[in-house]
Structure formats: structure tokens, C-alpha cells
Image (tube, rainbow, N blue to C red):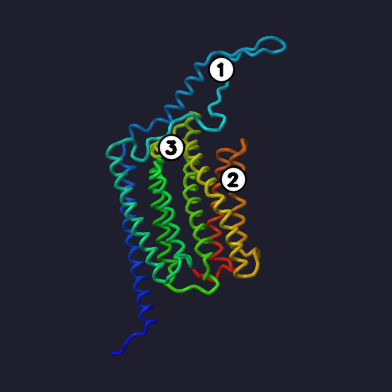
Amino acid sequence: MTLATGTELATAANEHLANISNTLIYSAMAVYTLAFFAYIAEWLFGSRSKVARTAAALTTGAEKAKSAPAVTVQTAGGTAVLERPKVVVRSSAGARDVPDGPGAHGGDEQGDLYGRIAISLTVLAFLVHLCGVIARAVSVQRAPWGNMYEFNITFSTVAVGVYLTLLVLKKNVRWLGLFLVTTVLLDLGIAVTVLYTASDQLVPALHSYWLYIHVSTAILCGAVFYVGAAGTLLYLFKDSYETKLENGGTPGRFATSFLERLPASSSLDKFAYRLNAAVFPLWTFTIIAGAIWAESAWGRYWGWDPKETWAFITWVAYACYLHARATAGWKGRKAAYLALIAFGCWLFNYYGVNIFVSGKHSYAGV
């Protein structure tokens, strides 16, 4: 009988924990799938009889416009009478005066029950998911974001955590649940198939406390940017829907059933803007922290490495969005397009640069 050495025992223990992590990630995916079906049920079985608020508000506004009294305008040559004065539907902030939708449940008790089940399953999946990330970290005795697989599973955990935190803060964001869980499942599916990397130690250059500071803030920023991008995308759909109603059009039944339950376009716009504005200073710190780490590891603060370059491009894109959003002429859809472009830069900075471009950040592997 041969006794194993201490190193061999440590390796076996690490492999065991890595296998536990994999099992927990797959288990989390299974629970997320159940949550996905619960969110679907919330949308399908929620009442559709209470979701005509936007149309009613815009119709009322149009009727008021028609019944408005005549307006007299003094001119140099006499008096001109406008029988149908122009009515400004949008406020000075660029938002229509319409209420938020009732939510995915449609204001219905049955729909609300499915929604609560979906939230409970999301919380359970998040906890299992988090345990999987922790097990992965313990298996290698380091931060669980040393390669793209680890970054993916950690990023999706934080994204769900941001969503649940907003719920705890009494923010009405349950309408985001279906979109969130769907994309998290896609992210984890890519992670466990295409991006999976066996548990291993890092190269010496990554053994620094800056790994915990720089990369953790990048993950948090990305998760918040992601939630903000989801809000921006839904804003564009809701704004188009409101515009069509405002112009007398008739949207399809599916669009009406879905979009009427979302918050008003103005609420979605504010939601996305506040998230992006709140996390932008942290993204600035992330770039600064990366520069400090680069000086320690490579002897220079900035070298226009592809990862550094695209991090800076992302910063510029979000800075342009925030500036445009604060400028009267760039509110609404134009600013929303900038926000999506900025998030696209963040995605390319992670996926595109890591997979298609070689640089000093390529040593972590896929």
C-alpha cells in the first residue's frame, strides 16, 4: 500500500471541490430553468384585462387636445384665432404623462402567485450558483475569476445579485426577471460548454491583491451595466409602442399584452440612466486600478494593450452617454442608442478581445 504525499492529497482535494463546483453550477442552471417557466407562467396567466393604462392615458390626452379652447394670438396686423392649438404631449423632460404598467402579473392574484414562485426559485438558484462559485474559489485557493469560465459564472452570479438587491430595496423590477433568467441561462450554457477550463493555478503575474480589487470591480460594473442595458432595450420597445398609440396606430395583441405591463418609457429611461450613472465612477476606478496593477506587473501604467484600449473606449462611450443624457437635445432614444453602444463596447472588451485579439491580458486563457 502506497501512501499519498501531501501534494497529491491537496491536488485530489482540489479536484474534488472543483467537481462539487461543477455540480452546483449545473444544479443552479436546473433551478434557473424552473424559475424561467415560473416567469413565463406569470406573463401568460396574469390578467390582461387591467393592462390598458397607456392607451387610456394617451387617448384621454388626445380628447383633451380636441376639446381645448381656442387660443387668440396678437399680431401686428390684427388678431389670429387658432381653432386647434398644438398640444405638447411630452413634458419638458421628454416623458409622456402615462402611468406605469401593473407588472408581469397584470395585477392579477394568480399571476402574482406565479411571480412570487419565480422570485423564490431565483433566490434558490442564486444561492446554489453562489456556492458553486465559492467552491471553485476554494478548489484553487484564489479568486474565482482567473479565466473566462470563472469570470462568466461569477459575472452571472453578480448580475442576479444586483436584480435581487433592487427587489430588496423595494424597486419594482420583477418585470426584468424573465429577461434576466433567460440571459443568465444562456451565459452559463456558454460557460459550461464553450468556455469551460479545468481548475488550475494562475501564472505568477496574476498573484496579486489587485486581482481581487481590479477584476471584482470590473465584474460588478459589468453586472450593473448589463441590468441598465436591459432596461434601455425595453425602454426602446415601450417608447415605440407609446409613439404608435400616440399617433393613432394599433399595435398587435402580443405587443399590447407584453408592453402594457412594463413601466412607462419615462420610468424605464430613468431606471437605466440611474444605474449607469451610479456605477460609472466605479468603472473609472476599475481602469485606474488596472493601470496601477499594470505598473506593478509590467513596469508601465498604460501601454495601449487591446484590453486597456477597449476598457478606455467603454469609458468614453459611457461618458458620452451620460453627457448626452444630461443634455436636453439628446434625451430619449438617441441617448438610449448610445447606452447600448457603450454596453456593446463592454461586451467586446470581454468576449471579443479575449477570444480574437492577443495581448498581455491573454495569459489567463479561455
Which quadrant of the view contains residue 301?
Answer: bottom right
Rendering coords of residue 358 (x, y %): 59, 69
Q: Disc 2 vs disc 1: which is toward the camera?
A: 2
Amino acid type indicated by mark 1:
Arg
- Would residue 123 appear left or right of 272 to someone viewing this image? left
Q: Disc 1 vs disc 3: which is toward the camera?
A: 3
**Residue at position x 30%, y 36% from top?**
108
> Marks 1 and 3, Cα distance to the nearest angstrom?
31 Å
Which secondary structure lies at badge 2?
helix
**Residue at position x 54%, y 45% from top?**
277
- Would residue 28 appear left or right of 59 to someone viewing this image? left
Instruction: Examine the rendered structure and indicate whether residue 283 appears above or below residue 1.
Output: above
> Marks 2 and 3, Cα distance to the nearest angstrom?
22 Å
- Would residue 264 appear left or right of 300 to someone viewing this image? left
Which secondary structure lies at badge 1?
loop
Q: Which residue is mark 2?
A: 321
Instruction: Examine the rendered structure and indicate whether residue 157 appears above or below residue 70.
Output: below
**Residue at position x 38%, y 45% from top?**
168
Q: Which residue is mark 3?
A: 263
Amino acid type indicated by mark 2:
Tyr
Question: Which of the marked residues, 1 or 3, is nearer the chain's N terminus?
Answer: 1
The answer to the question of whether label 2 and label 3 lie on touching residues, with beta carbons closer than 8 A, is no
Question: Which of the marked residues, 2 or 1, is nearer the chain's N terminus?
Answer: 1
Binning the other alpha carbons within 10 Å of mark 2 as few (below 14), some (14 to 19) or many (20 upward) gives many
Binning the other alpha carbons within 10 Å of mark 1 as few (below 14), some (14 to 19) or many (20 upward) gives few
Which secondary structure lies at badge 3?
loop
Instruction: Examine the rendered structure and indicate whether residue 363 appears above or below residue 41.
Output: below
**Residue at position x 37%, y 59% from top?**
130
Q: Which residue is mark 1?
A: 84
Q: Which mark is residue 125?
A: none
The answer to the question of whether label 2 and label 1 lie on touching residues, with beta carbons closer than 8 A, is no
Amino acid type indicated by mark 3:
Pro
